[in-house]
Image: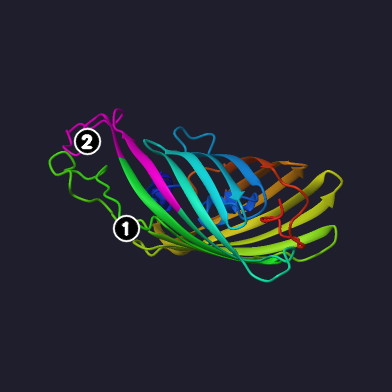
Amino acid sequence: MKRIYISILLFFVFNLASWAQEGIPVYFDYLADNYYLVYPSMAGIGEGGKVRLTARKQWFSVDEAPNLQTLNAHYRIGEKSGVGAIIFNDANGYHSQTGAKFTYAHHLKFGEDIRSLNQLSFGLSGTILQSSLDETEFRSVNPDPAIVGSKISAAYFNTDLGVSYNFLEFYAHAAILNLLSSKRNLYYKDRTDNPNQLEVDNLRRYLFSVGYVFGRGDWQLEPSVLLQMTDFTEEKAIDINAKIYKDVDFGKVWGGISYRRSFDGAQYATSNSFGEQRLQLITPIVGVNYKKFMVSYNYSYQMGDIRFDNGGFHQITLGYDFLQSEKRYDCNCPAVNY
């Protein structure tokens, strides 16, 4: 029984970052040719446009388990501009957030050869978000003045900044998410009496990615890493990724694996010892690009002795690429040549 309570505690600890994240949590959506979901500077990165629809569900055997849905599209306008939009719904137990992002990106090309990819990009996104808390199911023997027993919601605005550099098969990205300090009084115990009291107004996150695509034949290998840091809590985590592509008559088939590890651990106690466990996720991913269509699936498995549930996290992504002509750049760069 004690281990059950510990597991539940760790569940809240490990998912606190997702609750505290204003906007879209960073999962593994970006590995499905979907870097725009993470970096605003990737809006309109290549010729034409992309549409991506993603659905994620954790722990099918658990009621009110976390789930996320996103729909995004971005498009190149002229030689130097890109625009994009994202709508999303993120639910976790009694808490949910729904919002939209609107993006403008500016792309600077270097060199005289138009088929040689050498591009520096900047992006800015504005986010409109509504966060909700359903307290109608909360029960307490002794009434708690902090619980109003109804559905509460509050709206916020924030911005994201991003920069990307793409040179042939090499790429690097950086972003600051939730740049502004947001007035968040949704959970504050005196929110009715003192609505101007802030909860946590610094939800800033920093993201960095770097990767390279090896191979100019039918097979390609793409190793990459993504590092994310949370400013207020100083939490850090790293993704180490590897993807393999195979060219076929109708497009590409590909697969890969990602390993996520946090730098910060949660302490726990058993009947006769103490320990510390860090968040570790193993995520295999497979996908197919059929002409202008794309479909991918990934499954995340949480490692460690203490877990909330034996099940994993399922995610599927559907995509469509539109208004492309022949490949614009002479490189194996799937994020740009789509």
| Residue neighbourhood size for the residue with mark 2, other residues' Cα within 10 Å, grouped as few (<14), some (14–19), many (≥20) | some
Examine the rendering and report whether any part of residue 305 can be seen.
no
Residue under the image location 50 percent in, 40 percent down: 68
Direction from residue 151 to residue 270 in the image, left or right: right
Residue placed most toward the observer, 334 or 32: 334
Q: Where is residue 305? Give x, y as percent.
A: 52, 54
What is the C-alpha distance between the residues marked 1 and 2?
24 Å
Question: Quick check: 121 above or below 318?
Answer: below
- Mark seen at residue 202: 1
Examine the rendering and report whether any part of residue 286 can be seen.
yes
Q: Where is residue 329? Give x, y as percent.
A: 74, 60
335 in the magenta segment: no
Sequence-first disc among 1 and 2? 2
Viewport quadrant of the N terminus: top left
Residue under the image location 44 percent in, 41 percent down: 100
SS type, badge 2: loop
Instruction: Give the residue at mark 2.
Output: 147
128 in the magenta segment: yes
Q: Where is residue 183? Give x, y as percent.
A: 26, 49
Question: Quick check: 62 above or below 288?
Answer: above
| Residue neighbourhood size for the residue with mark 1, other residues' Cα within 10 Å, grouped as few (<14), some (14–19), many (≥20) | some
Which is closer to the viewer, label 1 or label 2? 1
Direction from residue 43 to residue 8 in the image, left or right: left
SS type, badge 1: loop
Magenta stretch in the rendered image = 125-154
Furthest toward the bottom, the residue is 111
Question: Quick check: 273 above or below 21?
Answer: below
